[in-house]
Amino acid sequence: MPDKENLFNKFEEILYVKPKSLLRKLVQKSFIKLLSISSGNKFLFYKKKIIIILERFVSFFRYFNIIFLRLKYPQYLSLPSKHLHAICVTNKFLKVLKPKKIDFF
């Protein structure tokens, strides 16, 4: 019996991958290298702490993103924030599909 995850990955096709910018890639590699050199044995401990700090920053940033979406789409002001985010993601998805001439709606 085939594994469901492998079966899904076999038929999966990625329509769009947002590439990392060169600057971000260089900063990430240099930061990891600097952290591994400076911390030595506690590299994994510090890496986990930094990931926790970044996750908190991202959750804090989401609140500002919701405020921005409420200003961007004032006609949907009464919608919950997750619905508003879904509308924004759908609009981005449709913009990606437009050059490929795929029309779902």
Image (spheres, grey):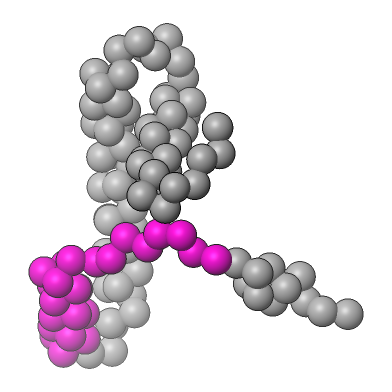
Q: Is residue 4 visible?
A: yes
Write down the quadrant of residue 4 in the picture. bottom right
Residue in the image at 19% along x and 73% along y: 25
Write down the quadrant of residue 22 in the picture. bottom left
Q: Residue 57: x percent and y percent?
A: 26, 47
Write down the quadrant of residue 44 in the picture. bottom left
Residue in the image at 28% along x and 82% along y: 43
Q: Against 64, is 5 above or below?
A: below
- Residue found at the far front of this picture: 101
Residue in the image at 40% along x and 59% along y: 16
| SS assignment for the magenta stretch, majority | helix
Q: Is residue 33 magenta?
A: yes
Quadrant for the N terminus in the image: bottom right
Q: Against 89, is 74 above or below?
A: above
Q: Is residue 19 left or right of residue 100?
A: left
Q: Nearer the viewer, residue 61 or 75?
A: 75
Q: Residue 70: x percent and y percent?
A: 30, 19
Q: Which residues are magenta?
A: 13-38
Q: Against 52, is 73 above or below?
A: above
Q: Is residue 62 left or right of residue 14?
A: left
Residue in the image at 46% along x and 19% along y: 80
